Image (cartoon, rainbow, N blue to C red):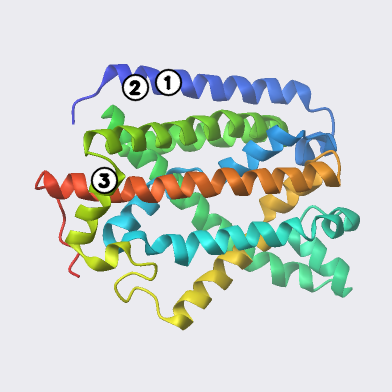
Amino acid sequence: MAVNYFYLGTFILYLLIVLAIGVWGYFKTTDVSDFWVYGKDLGPWLATWSFVANFVSAVSVIGFIGSVYGGGYSILTGIVLGLMLGISGLYFVVHRVRALDEITFPDIVANITGREWARPVTAVPLLANAWIYLIMQLVGASLLVTTITGVPYKYMIWVIGFVFIVYTVLGGMVSVAWTDLLQGTVMVATVLAALVYMTVTQGGLTAINTEFATMGTGNVAPLGAGAYTLIGLVGSLIAFFGTIFTGQNYIIRINATRDIKTAKFHLAASGVILSVFYAALVLLGGATTVALNGSGLGVDNGG
C-alpha cells in the first residue's frame, strides 16, 4: 500500500495537537482532584462532548457500519435502544451518585453494601471489560489510519497507543475532556458529512432504502431477518443498559461536573446528540452497503 503523504501529514498534525493538549493539561493539573475529576468544575458542554466522545470512536464507526452490512437496521433496536436506556437510567440516579462522592463503581458497591470484599469482586470483571474495549479501540483506530495513510499497521498501532497513553497520563481528566471535545466534534461532523455525500450521490434516502430492502427484506425490519428473538432482544437491551449504568468513565464524568444540574444536563444533551449520531451512522451503513453492492464489491456474509 502506497503512503498518502497528505493524509499522513494531516494525521501527524492531529497527533501533535492532541499531545499539546496533554502538555497543557499537565500544567493545569495541580492536585489529585484535578487529575481524576477535573477539580469538579467540568462545564455542561465540555462534559457533554467528553461523554459523547466515549461512544464516537473507531469501534462505533467500523462496528456499526459492519453490523448494518451484515444484519440491516436491526442494530438500532438491539443496541442503540439499550444504550439510550442506560443513559436515561444514569440521569435518574445522578443525585445519588453525587451524594456517595465515590469515583469508582467498586467503591460505590462497597459503600452501599458495607462489604469491603465487594471491591475486588466488582473490579475484576470491569477491568477485564476495560482491557477488551481498549484493545478494540486501539486496533480499530490503527486499521482506519493504516487504510487512510498507507502506513503499515504494525507501526501505527504503536504510535497511536503511545500518544493516547501519554496525553492521558500527562493531564488526566483535564486533557481527556479537551481531547474528547476535539475528537467527538470531528467524528460527528465527519459521519454527518459522509451521510450527506452518500445520500446525494445515490439519489436520496428513499432510493437507498428501497435498494437496501431489495437486497433483503430483513435489512429494513426492526428485528432483522431473524437476527433477534424476543429473549435475545431483551438480553441485548439489558446488557447494554448495564454497560452504561455501571461504566467507570461515566461515573467519573458525573462526579467531575460542577453540580447536579450540570451532570443531568450533560447526560440529557449527550443522549440527544448520540441518538442523532447513531441514527446517521446506521443510515450511512445502509448507504455504504448499497454502494458496495452496486459497485460489485459486496462481500458474501454466508447468510
Along the line of sight, which residue is nearer the eye, 210 or 65?
210
Q: Mark 2 points at which residue?
A: 8
Image quarter (top left, top right, bottom left or bottom right) of the C terminus: bottom left
Q: Name the residue under label 3.
A: 288
Q: Residue at x 73, y 45 (%)?
A: 253
Residue 183 lies, in percent from the top left, at 53, 32
Left or right: residue 7 versus residue 120 is: left
Residue 163 lies, in percent from the top left, at 52, 31
Q: Name the residue under label 1.
A: 12
Left or right: residue 181 versus residue 143 is: right
Q: Say which amino acid is labelled 3.
A: Thr
Label placed on residue 71: none
Q: Residue at x 60, y 34 (%)?
A: 180
State which tag comes first along the sequence, 3 or 1: 1
Q: Say which amino acid is labelled 2.
A: Leu
Q: Say which amino acid is labelled 1.
A: Ile
For marks 2 and 3, give the one nearer the viewer. Answer: 3
Would you say the residues marked 2 and 3 are in contact, meaning their CB atoms lie under 8 Å apart?
no
Would you say the residues marked 1 and 2 are in contact, meaning their CB atoms lie under 8 Å apart?
yes
The answer to whether residue 252 of the structure is visible from this angle is yes
Q: How far apart are marks 2 and 3 (CA)?
A: 24 Å
Q: How far apart are marks 3 and 1 (CA)?
A: 28 Å
Residue 98 lies, in percent from the top left, at 86, 53
Image quarter (top left, top right, bottom left or bottom right) of the N terminus: top left
Residue 276 lies, in percent from the top left, at 51, 45
Name the image quarter holding residue 171.
top right
